[in-house]
Amino acid sequence: MITIDIELKDKPGELLKVLTPISKHGANVISVIHSREEKRGGKVPVRIVIDVEDKEKLKNILEDLEKEGAIIKKIDGKDKKVYLDVVVIGHVVDTNVRDTIDRINEIGLVEDLDLIMPHPDKESSAMMRIIIDEDKIEELFYLFEELEKEKGLLFIKSIF
């Protein structure tokens, strides 16, 4: 048995969308816990326990779950995705914030962005919440170093 912890958008039909790939790949659903009372940021945590024959089928199921918009948080208690909060200081807007986000999104996903601009001539700051596979964090930190050099920004990373 495999336990998969995911987050889904809190809207009708999302749970069904993630159960379909499990069935399609021949796995049996043992249990589903849909924790609506723990909703955060418009997302609901869901724990699905399945019985699947082999690792290839599990891999296909996980890929399809992500295609359906599920954020896979843990597999059998091991973190798959982590949230990383980052403060960016500098001329965030003037150095093309869209480009910065797009480049981060090639590695992870900027889920939320709060921007503070005290004055057009002064440096701004932004708080980004990034969802990323745990095994891609080092690649993301390397990108931050590149962006710091290229755009003169400072990235302050949260400790997780």
Image: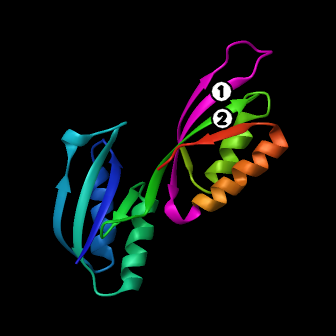
Residues rendered magenta in the picture: 111-136
Give the quarter of the image for residue 127: top right
> Which residue is at 78% across, 50% downward?
146
Q: Is residue 129 magenta?
A: yes
Horizontal and vertical percent for residue 144? 70, 48
Horizontal and vertical percent for residue 131? 50, 50
Crowdedness near tag 2: few (<14), some (14–19) or many (≥20) residues, C-alpha within 10 Å? many
Is residue 125 found left or right of 99 in the rendered image? left
The disc at residue 21 is: none
Horizontal and vertical percent for residue 25? 33, 78
The disc at residue 125 is: 1
> Which residue is at 74% across, 22% downward?
123
Crowdedness near tag 1: few (<14), some (14–19) or many (≥20) residues, C-alpha within 10 Å? many
Give the quarter of the image for residue 63: bottom left
> Which residue is at 30% across, 60% downward?
5
Q: Earlier in the sequence, mark 2 or mark 1?
A: 2
Label count reads 2
Circle 2 sits on which residue? 88
**Amino acid under disc 1:** Ser
Q: Is residue 16 above or below residue 148?
A: below
Horizontal and vertical percent for residue 22? 30, 71
Q: Secondary structure at mark 2?
A: strand
> Which residue is at 33% across, 57% downward?
6
Q: Considering the image in quadrants, where does the N terminus appear?
A: bottom left
> In the displayed image of the protein, which residue is found farthest to the front?
159
Q: Is residue 147 above or below residue 93?
A: below
> In the displayed image of the protein, which residue is found farthest to the bottom?
54
